[in-house]
Image (tube, rainbow, N blue to C red):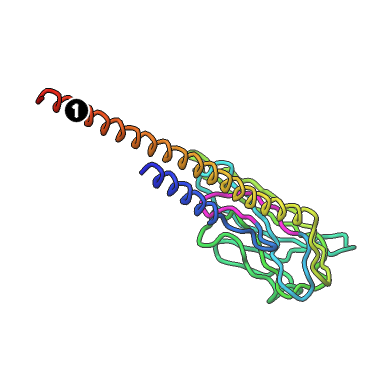
Amino acid sequence: MHFSVGLSLCLLGFALVSLFPQPARGQALYEGRGACAEVDSDTEAVAGVGFKLGCISCKRRTEVIATATVEWYFRGKGEADFFHIYSYNEDGATVESDNFVGRVDWNGSKRSNDIQDASIYLLNVTFNDSGTYQCFFNRILAYDNYDYTTVISKVVKLTVVAKATRGTASIVSEFMMYFTVIGLQVWLLIEMIYCYRKISAHGEEALREAANAEYLAIATEGKDNCGGVQVGE
C-alpha cells in the first residue's frame, strides 16, 4: 500500500513537470491580463513585414480610477524634429500623418479608457521607418476630492534591417529557459529514483517483518500444541 501510494505521487510530480511549457523559438514572456508590467519594446524590424511598437505605462495605484489618451510622434533617421503620426482616445484612433495612413493599427488596451498599453502595429515596414518613436500618455487620475493630470513618455529607437538577426540577450534568455526546464526534469528523475528505492526498501522490510511475525506465530502455535499433547498423556 505504501509502495503504491509513494510511487503514484512520484509519477504525478513527473507528469506535472513534463507539462511545464517548452519555450518556443523566439517566444517572449509577457504579463497576464490581471497585472501590468512595463516591458520594453523590440527595436529591430524587418523590411516588408509588420512590427509592434511597444509602449506600456502602468498605474502605480491600481485602485485609482483613471482615463488616458495617447499620442505617438516620429523623428526619422537623420532628421531634427518630431512630427505627430498617431492619436488614440475614447473616440478611437486617428492617423495624423499621410506617411502612415493605412499602415498603423492600434495594438494596445481595448474596451477601456484606462489605457496602460499604448502599443501600435506598423504594417509593411520600410527602411524609411527607421528612427525614433515617442509615445505620450496623457493620464488623469480621479481621486476623491480632485483630479491629477500627469504626462508620461516612452521612447523607442527603431532600426529596420533586410533580414532578422537574433540579439545576444534573446539567445541567452532562450538558453536559460531550456536549461531551467531540463534541470527540473533531471531533478525530478533523480527524486523518482530515490523515492522508488526508498519505497522498495520499506516494502522489503515490511515483507521481512511479516514473514518473521508469521514464523513466530507458527512457532508459538506449535509449542502450544506440544504442551497440549503432554498434558493429555
Q: Is residue 11 above or below residue 93?
A: above
Q: Which sits in the foreground, 120 or 217?
A: 217
Q: Is residue 228 magenta?
A: no
Name the kind of residue labelled 1 in the image: Cys
Which part of the image, by quadrant, shows the N terminus? top left
Q: Which sits in the foreground, 197 or 169?
A: 197
Position of 137 compared to 211: left or right?
right
Magenta span of residues: 29-42
Q: In terms of secondary structure, where does tag 1 sit?
A: helix
Place of residue 189 in the rendered image (x, y in percent of width and height, measured from the top left)? 57, 48
Position of 106 compared to 231: left or right?
right
**What residue sits right under mark 1 in the picture?**
226
Quadrant in the rendering for residue 160: bottom right
Residue in the image at 80% along x and 55% along y: 168
Q: Is residue 31 magenta?
A: yes
Q: Is residue 225 above or below residue 196?
A: above
Place of residue 60 in the rendered image (x, y in percent of width and height, measured from the top left)? 59, 42
Q: Residue furthest top?
A: 231
Residue in the image at 50% along x and 42% along y: 195
Q: Residues within 10 Å of mark 1 (few under 14, many from 20)?
A: few
Q: Which sits in the foreground, 37 or 99?
A: 37
Q: Is residue 99 above or below residue 159?
A: below
Quadrant in the rendering for residue 120: bottom right
Place of residue 126 in the rendered image (x, y in percent of width and height, measured from the top left)? 80, 73
